[in-house]
Amino acid sequence: MDKKTIDRIRKNEERLDNINNCIKNVENALEKFKKNKKNINMLNKYYGSTNWFKDKEAYENNEIPKIKAGVLSEDAVWNMNDDIKELILEMKSIVKSFNV
């Protein structure tokens, strides 16, 4: 067998390995994302609720300790939802671009 043939096989074998690793990474990421659906729904229910407004006011009035509280910002949950929408659009675009 000539060198050109061997190189072609090796390059395509490398492509196959890389794609299989990528697929496994995407599968893992999607599984984690699906497992967080309940958390996303619960967070969206909390955001803008009566409890959220009470917690935000208490935090701003120093009635509770200064803890990590990005969830009380005006933008954190909103931006998270926007990121999810963008991710979904990107996934749809990727699916449409494949010819498998």
Image (tube, grey):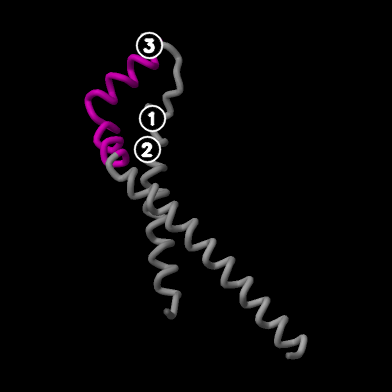
**Horizontal and vertical percent for residue 36?**
34, 43
Q: Write the residue at 30% across / 45% down.
A: 37
Vertical position of residue 11 compared to residue 23: above or below? below
The residue where tag 1 is placed is 71
**Horizontal and vertical percent for residue 79?**
41, 42
Q: Amino acid under label 2?
A: Val
- Marks 2 and 1: CB-CB under 8 Å? yes
In this picture, which residue range is highlighted in magenta? Answer: 39-62
| Quadrant of image for the C terminus | bottom left
Q: Outermost residue, top direction?
A: 63
Q: CA distance from mark 3 to mark 2?
A: 21 Å
Residue 40 on the magenta segment: yes
Numbered badge on residue 77:
2
The residue where tag 3 is placed is 64
**Horizontal and vertical percent for residue 20?**
52, 66
Residue 55 on the magenta segment: yes
Q: Position of 37 compared to 69: left or right?
A: left
Judged by its main secondary structure, the magenta piece is helix
